[in-house]
Amino acid sequence: MWWIYALLSAAFAALTAIFAKIGIKGVDSDLATAIRTVIILIIAWSIALYKGSAENMGALSKTNWTFLVLSGCATGLSWIFYFKALQVGNVSQVAPVDKLSVALAIILSAIFLKDPITIKSASGALLIIAGTLVLIF
């Protein structure tokens, strides 16, 4: 089932790039990111409240809070730089380079989470890195 969610994530990420490129025309990329973030905030909280998930906030540990806050900061910075890149670059170049995050996540997960690096995951990461370099140069 996880792969269905991952495919949906990829599809919506692709739409994000297209919609964002159209939406930021003539708009400061930081303002565009702020507007987008408010929409995401409304949607995420609506879902959490609808499902009753918000009731579990009191059960979150300090570690949960710390790393969720760090993740939020990383996401925010990622969006700011992504929108800036989209504003000055082509979607066909920016979106694939942004996906270098997949290879970086594989490497970082091995270092920090002790996830195993298999031949398959290493090969995939190397191909992503090679593809990114092709697009940049």
Image (spheres, rainbow, N blue to C red):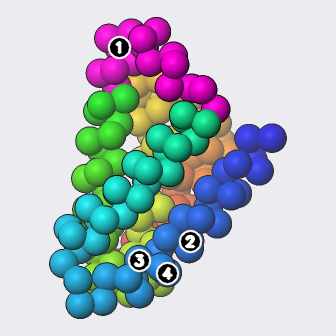
Marks 3 and 4: CB-CB under 8 Å? yes
Question: Toward the viewer: 48 or 32?
Answer: 48
Q: Magenta region, mostly helix, strand or loop? A: helix
Q: Amino acid at mark 3?
A: Ala
Q: Any mark on residue 20, and which?
A: 3
Mark 1 / mark 3, whichever is N-terminal = 3
Residue 1, by quadrant, is top right
Query: Distance between the Cα atoms at labels 4 and 1?
Result: 36 Å
Assess disc 1: are there few (<14), some (14-19) or many (≥20) residues with their C-alpha within 10 Å of its C-alpha: few
What SS does tag 2 mark? Answer: helix
Query: Distance between the Cα atoms at labels 1 and 2?
Result: 32 Å
> Which residue carries the number 4 mark?
18
Query: Distance between the Cα atoms at labels 3 and 4?
Result: 5 Å
23 to 104, vertically: above or below: below
Q: Any mark on residue 14, and which?
A: 2
Q: Amino acid at mark 2?
A: Ala
What SS does tag 3 mark? Answer: helix
Marks 2 and 4: CB-CB under 8 Å? yes
Q: Residue at x 56, y 71 (%)?
A: 14
In magenta, the rendered stretch is 51-67
What SS does tag 4 mark? Answer: helix
Q: Position of residue 67 (x, y in %)?
A: 34, 25
Q: Any mark on residue 63, and which?
A: 1
57 to 42, vertically: above or below: above
